[in-house]
Amino acid sequence: MISTEQHMHAWHQTLIDHGASLDDTQSFIFPESAGYVSVDDSRSSCFYLSHLRCIEITGGDAHDFLQGQLSCDMNTISDTHSGIGSHNNLKGRMISSFRILKISEAYHLIIDQSIADECVAQLNKYAVFSDVQIKINPDMIFLGVQSTTIDKALHNKSSSNGAVSATSTAHSIRVSHSTARNMFALNVIHAQGKWTQLLASCTPTNNVVWKALDIHDGLSWITHATQDMFLPQSLNYHLIDGLSFTKGCYIGQEVIVRTQHRGKIKRILSRFVIDSASLTSPSAITPGHALHHGGKTIGVITSTAQIGKRHYVLAVVHIDYAEFTDGLCDEHDQEIHINSADTSTPFSISKSS
């Protein structure tokens, strides 16, 4: 019997045999991706989302257990609709965030690899008296596609964000609010077949571009660098059905709801495009690092991705500075040249919130 490790090795070797290489973060680099210079590129692209892991929750109490733990309303998650949520600490700060996919009676949290093990440990702390089993599923991998022209490969014709459709080998999730993007969740034994299918119409593309497209869509995910820093509404999770104020109790709920009702949210998610050539210290433009203006800390970076000469950035910024393009500095007080700054993500954002 072939083991998961052997299947994974065969899958990775297939990518390498077709010209891919591994960078320092163990992400696959595709030579065909070199010409991708902007999130506005209209080419059809496919991605191996090697930065993601799957946490699987099963058992008779799985639904009720997660309903009492996560920020989202689990009643909205079904075999045909996925969702977004977070697991928070007692102060309402996000320990982890993820997409949630239901397959039969099992729930799958699609999460950044840097926090997968810790997320399992945190959930297991509360699972002692529930009939649930929580573990990383090493067999499941994730592929992505951006295209408006390959419906046969997408197997998901719905334009509704979060919509799920299934074939015998993969589950397709509509993941974008504004761009034609789908994610495939599938067992690694089917990876080569699905990848071959996608290559017939798509260009293999580095997953940093997928991260930039998330930023373009205003989607920010917790990684190890940003744990315990943000309330869910600071990352707009209340605007993408990732946060419920009405479902009842869950970890951190009291602080989250009280903050919302008292109107104390003074920092909002803002999107910046930074000229990479202007950065004297590119390492300062990374998640968890501060942004300054006039000597004051006015925000914290949540997500970054560099494509060509541009850094795409999401940051939680004080509302008075959310659209500034002049005088913004990194945490070393080196000025940053902002090509554009806005809060016009695909979600309706009110600065008075």
Image (cartoon, rainbow, N blue to C red):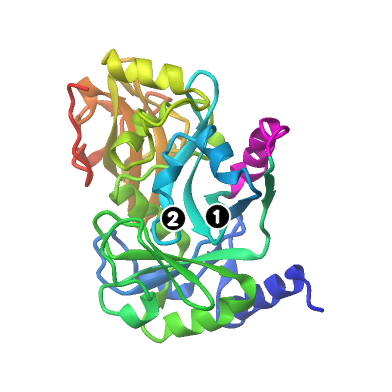
The image shows residue 39 at horizontal and vertical percentages of 29, 59
**Residue 348 left/right relative to 287:** left
The N terminus appears in which quarter of the rendering? bottom right
Residue 95 visible in the displayed image: no
Task: Check residue 78 in the rendering and tell me which mark sits there, or answer none.
Answer: 2
Residue drawn at the location 45% of the way across and 30% of the way down: 289
* Percent of width and height locating residue 304: 40, 44
Determine which residue is flagged by label 1.
52
Q: Which residues are magenta?
A: 113-130
The amino acid marked with disc number 1 is Leu
Give the camera-side residue of 168 and 86: 168
Q: Residue furthest front?
A: 60
User: Quick one: label 1 or label 2, which is nearer the N terminus?
Assistant: 1
Q: How many marks overall?
A: 2
Q: Decide which of 162, 227 is in the foreground and name it.
A: 162
Quarter of the picture holding the C terminus: top left
